[in-house]
Image: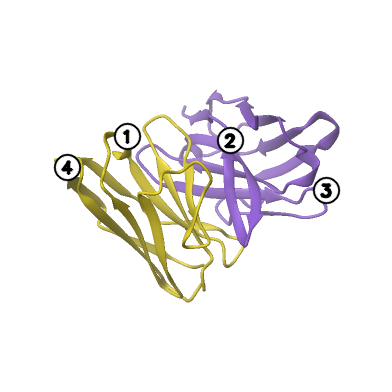
Amino acid sequence: QVRLEESGGGVVQPGTSLRLSCVASGFLFSAYTMHWVRQAPGRGPEWVAQIAKDASENFSADSVKGRFSISRDNSKNTLFLQLDNVRPEDTAVYFCARERRRLIPQFDSWGQGTRVIVSS
Amino acid sequence: DIQLTQSPSFLSASVGDRVTITCRTSQTINSFLNWYQQKPGKAPKLLIYAASELQSGVPSRFSGSGATTDFTLTISGLQPDDFATYYCQQVYTSPPLTFGGGTKIDIK
């Protein structure tokens, strides 16, 4: 079955870097646009970034632009999110999600999330 | 960016109740709206896509309706497993995709 498994979270100091990974299995990873979504404590989900199935284009939220970058390695069925110059407001659970397109785009599969805490 | 306003933010209900949650968007999005359910410590789960299409495996007591700027999620006959937080999401403009602020349903 479809499975997404994130890793790489942890406690980091402001201004430092972190790389999150999401390993996919159970489907043809290279055929899907993928997303990162985060959720701060007590808040709703916030879309962070997306990357096309062949990595030909990617987009990110204004709140992380210039600091976070999304990438993928289709040969390893893995999605990445590089977090640079992190801030306390980046504290959240980070989910990877698969975009399916039935009539419109939707996120039909999600990982369990990896927690990032930015604190001095 | 398109803003999504959900109401109510919080709702107390009993098993068997019919519950309706609304999502209003700041501009027209046709039917480019999805609904998710989230339980504590878990990822969101897709319930409804394209405003009214039921995701495979989701019980038929869940239904969605609406278009342009006003949408509803209805649960007909609330079950114990349905106590959770519900989010709408617009995918009309991307980026950014945006989520509503959520509606938490708890037990009365």
The residue located at (58%, 48%) in the rendering is A107
Quadrant location of the C terminus of chain B in the rendered image: top left
Hue used for the chain lettered A? purple
Disc nearest the viewer among 1 and 3: 1
The residues tagged by marks 1 and 4 sit, at their Cα atoms, a distance apart of: 12 Å
The residue located at (32%, 56%) in the rendering is B74
Eyeballing the image, is A21 above or below B87?
above
Q: Which residue is mark 4?
A: B14
| Outermost residue, front side | B60
Q: Which residue is mark 3?
A: A54
The residues tagged by marks 1 and 3 sit, at their Cα atoms, a distance apart of: 38 Å
Q: Amino acid at mark 3?
A: Asp
The residues tagged by marks 2 and 3 sit, at their Cα atoms, a distance apart of: 31 Å
Q: Which residue is mark 1?
A: B81
Do the residues under discs 1 and 3 have CB atoms within 8 angstroms? no
Residue B42's disc is: none
Mark 1 or mark 4: which comes first in sequence?
Answer: 4
Residue A15's disc is: 2
Residues at discs 1 and 4 both on one chain? yes
Q: Amino acid at mark 4?
A: Ser
Residues at discs 2 and 3 both on one chain? yes
The residues tagged by marks 2 and 1 sit, at their Cα atoms, a distance apart of: 41 Å
